[in-house]
Amino acid sequence: MSSWTYVSAIREHVGQEVTLKGWLANRRSSGKLHFLQVRDGTGTIQCVMEKKIVGDEPFDAAGALPLESSLAVSGTVREDPRSPIGFELAVTAFSVVAPAGLDYPIQKKEAGTDFLMDHRHLWLRSRRQQAILAVRAEIIRAIRDHLDSQGFTLIDAPILTPAACEGTSTLFETDYFGDKAYLTQSGQLYMEAAAMAFGRVYCFGPTFRAEKSKTRRHLTEFWMVEPEMAFVDLDGDMAIIEDLLVAVVARVLDRRREELKVVERDVSKLEAVRKPFPRMRYDEAIEVLKRAGASVEWGADFGGDEETILSRQHDSPLLVHRYPADVKAFYMKRDPQDPRLALAVDVLAPEGYGEIVGGSQREDDLAVLEASLERHKLPREAFEWYLDLRRYGTVTHSGFGIGIERTVAWICGLPHIRETIPFPRLMSRLSP
Ligand code: ATP
């Protein structure tokens, strides 16, 4: 057998005999020719099989092979301007690895979303789902590359935690040798500790929220990158968020154009993302919303509808900052200019996508933080270690969390978050 290669590397083998291993994605036949579409995970290539070259038996076997069977196919690589990838394979030999059953559940005809979600393990093979997950992988790589190049150190946060960082209402509880433990809802507090050791850090891991929200933007398990920086205030935080998002969009446009085409993304919208991003105080946002007819009062947090209105008005992500402290977490620093406000920022992705990043400057004063814990009725003992960070060399510091799935939904232009993660966990879905 000739040497094994991948569809993605096919251009390096023009005129050579190679072997590809993959699955039969589609087939068209005309008389003594089969056109086999072979998918190997890196791409799909048309393999042209001629009866007189491969012989009767293999030809008939290929003609009867059910779609999604696994196979190995050898042949000569030739250029073909009509091919979407520019190349095809002139088959000289083929063998079946394992034939698929005839009842492959995902057929060409339209299937409902529930059905497809029930068959997510097979749905992943479809072109569109592959494209979305390839963009997801690129976004993750872009975030890590960007942060790594900016002097951040990756610090992993624990997933099992003894206490909530914002109260226990949305936590998944589990038994921990007779005690209670919770699945993490954020690695932030641990990143604050790490920032005091490393300066600039980030964690990247799964996050769990037992939110009973059935929206197009909420998963119960999602992935978040949480950078945290010492000696950085809210303005610095916003500048770092902006640079990160610009780098991510540029990277996807640079490396994943094909996939964006598959998901039919209007890339001009992504190309319009530019620095500086618009910035708006919460106060101004309330005015904008009122003018747009929304019934929102000062003091309320924004829901999906409000975020949609605000984020439709700009080409680049919108940074809304200085929210009422009462709707924000206990660790956020109050604005010295107006103590009713928290030095918080939410980043709303354009085209109505809404929040993809939440961040803030953290309270660095011990006494203020102690009072805040009390006001939020949080158990002081659980936070003693966190208070230590203010006892021993406290500094101005800030950070943020960027949700991977919401970022993927925005960049791919998807109406719902469920297709942005390989195996989504929603309030009503825990399988496959
Ligand atoms: P929301 O108000 O939209 O529920 P949040 O304010 O609770 O979000 P943060 O705690 O600030 O969100 O989390 C930071 C980021 O994590 C969000 O901007 C978002 O991208 C992502 N995120 C938060 N909750 C979820 C969720 N349930 N599913 C998917 N992503 C989420």
Image: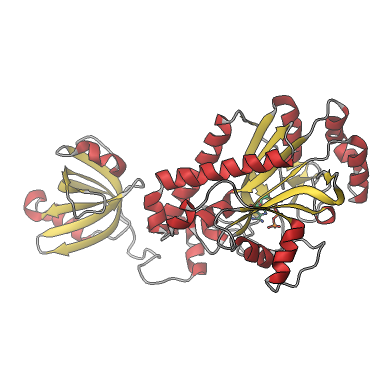
Identify the residue shown where x is 71% and y is 45%. Answer: 186
Is the N terminus in the top left, top right, bottom left or bottom right quadrant?
top left
* Position of 13 relative to 265 (above/below): above
Specify how the rendered protein is coloured.
Answer: secondary structure
Closer to the camera, 283 or 169? 283
| Place of residue 17 in the rendered image (x, y in percent of width and height, measured from the top left) | 16, 38
Closer to the camera, 227 or 4? 227
Closer to the camera, 429 or 260? 260
Identify the residue shown where x is 90% and y is 35%. Answer: 366
Image quarter of residue 67: bottom left
Closer to the camera, 205 or 408? 408
Identify the residue shown where x is 59% and y is 46%. Answer: 276
How many numbered circles does the render carry?
A: 0
Identify the residue shown where x is 59% and y is 63%. Answer: 312
* Position of 294 relative to 42 (above/below): below
| Place of residue 157 in the rendered image (x, y in percent of width and height, measured from the top left) | 69, 36
Image quarter of residue 289: bottom right
Q: Is residue 231 visible?
A: yes
Image quarter of residue 243: top right
| Place of residue 377 in the rendered image (x, y in percent of width and height, measured from the top left) | 91, 50
| Place of residue 154 in the rendered image (x, y in percent of width and height, measured from the top left) | 62, 32
* Position of 393 relative to 428 (above/below): above
